[in-house]
Amino acid sequence: MEQSIQQTALLKEMLGRLGSNDLTGAAALIGRRAEFGNSVAALSGEGPAQWRWTLPATPASLAAEIRDSGGRLVATPSVAMDGTTGTLSWDGVTSDGSRAPDGAYSLRLVAKDAGGGALSATVHSLGTVREVTQRGSELWLGLGSKVALPIADLLSIADS
């Protein structure tokens, strides 16, 4: 818990020092593990797409759907039910057994409670920052081939 508080404080300090045009300062994020407040993760030859989620209650059933950037369902990996939180690391193997191309993929969880009611999951993507770029006045963090997320979506950072 204390480490998490320190990481959050470090992140707030780093972001506080960054102006929208401060690429040099943002370069300190390269090589660090990051958690983003959205469900888009990077699949690349450098590693699997990864997510962390939280549910409001322990589910009676839980299913995962991985979709490509066009919204097409590409995989339905099994996920372990272990309380109200979990992680998923997807190696890119699709439902038909082929390998998905590098790119952006999103995770959707379908969770139900014991009465069959839907539980809404909060899903965050995880990845290692590979580059920092600027688009207009906003900084973006590259997480692998073809995937970059706005620094505004950054929730936490850690050493790799």
Image: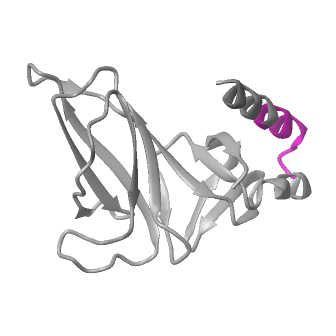
Left or right of 92, for residue 136: right
Residue at x-position 26% and y-position 52%: 65
> In the picture shown, does residue 9 fall above or below 74?
above
Residue 122 or residue 82, whichever sits in front: 82
Residue at x-position 81% and y-position 39%: 15
Left or right of 6, for residue 54: left
Q: Whole-percent x and y of residue 46?
A: 56, 74
Q: Whole-percent x and y of residue 51?
A: 45, 48
> In the picture shown, does residue 34 fall above or below 135?
above
Q: Quadrant of residue 120?
A: top left
Q: Quadrant of residue 81?
A: top left
Residue 12, magenta (yes or no): yes
Name, please, the residue furthest toward the left.
Answer: 115
State how many labels appear.
0
Left or right of 123, for residue 115: left
Main secondary structure along the magenta-highlighted residues: helix
Q: Whole-percent x and y of residue 95?
A: 19, 68
Residue 31 or residue 39, whichever sits in front: 31
Residue at x-position 75% and y-position 53%: 139
Left or right of 129, for residue 95: left
- For the record, the magenta segment spans 11-21
Report the quarter where the N terminus lies.
top right
Q: Whole-percent x and y of residue 63?
A: 20, 45
Report the quarter where the C terminus lies.
bottom right
Residue 134 or residue 40, whichever sits in front: 40
Q: How is the image coloured?
A: one colour
Residue at x-position 72% and y-position 55%: 32
> In the picture shown, does residue 45 fall above or below 70?
below
Residue 90, magenta (yes or no): no
